[in-house]
Image (cartoon, rainbow, N blue to C red):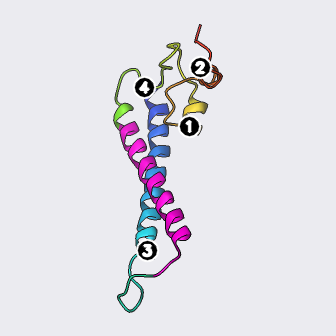
Amino acid sequence: MTAEQLSRLRRIVEAEIRDIHTALEQWRACNGLDENGRERVEDTAERALRQDWKHATDRRMMELLRLLGRMEEEDFGVCQECGEDIPLRRLEMVPTTTLCARCMERQEQGLAVA
């Protein structure tokens, strides 16, 4: 992977991190106190959905932050199964992937990589 390609991919990841950060700030603002300083009352199902979203978003943020560190490693962008380069287009679509599409498909089907 060239330095330019890596830089492009880094910008994609950093943009997603900024988007998540903004969404989390909005979530915090909407899940705090009402205009009178009291906790907002919501039904249990709505609260559970909001918490599920928050946990998934926190996990994604951590995944992306770890990815930024991995991008510095020499083997970034190399499939962990077959050792082939992961196409840049795939990394742009799924930047956290560690497998090429062929190995991912084989893994999902429960097949060993040849």
Amino acid at pointer 4: Phe
Q: Nearer the viewer, mark 2 or mark 4?
A: 2
Look at mark 1 in the image and give the residue it sits on.
Answer: 94
- Which mark is drawn over residue 76? 4
Which residue position is annotated with label 2? Answer: 103
Residue found 42% across the figure and 43% down from its top? 64
| Mark 2 Cα shell of 10 Å, populated few (<14), some (14-19), many (≥20) | some
Three-letter amino acid code at disc 2? Answer: Cys
Q: How many marks?
A: 4
Q: CA distance from mark 3 to mark 4?
A: 38 Å
Q: Dominant secondary structure of the magenta stretch?
A: helix
Quarter of the rendering occupied by the C terminus: top right
- What's drawn in magenta, residue-wise? 41-68
Report which quarter residue 89 is drawn in: top right
Counting residues from the start of the chain, the first of labels 3 and 4 encountered is 3
Q: Nearer the viewer, residue 56 or 13?
A: 56
- Contact check, label 4 and label 1, Cβ < 8 Å: no
Sequence-first tag of 2 and 3: 3
> On residue 78, which mark appears?
none
- Dot 3 or dot 1: first in sequence order is 3
| Relative to 110, 76 lies left or right | left
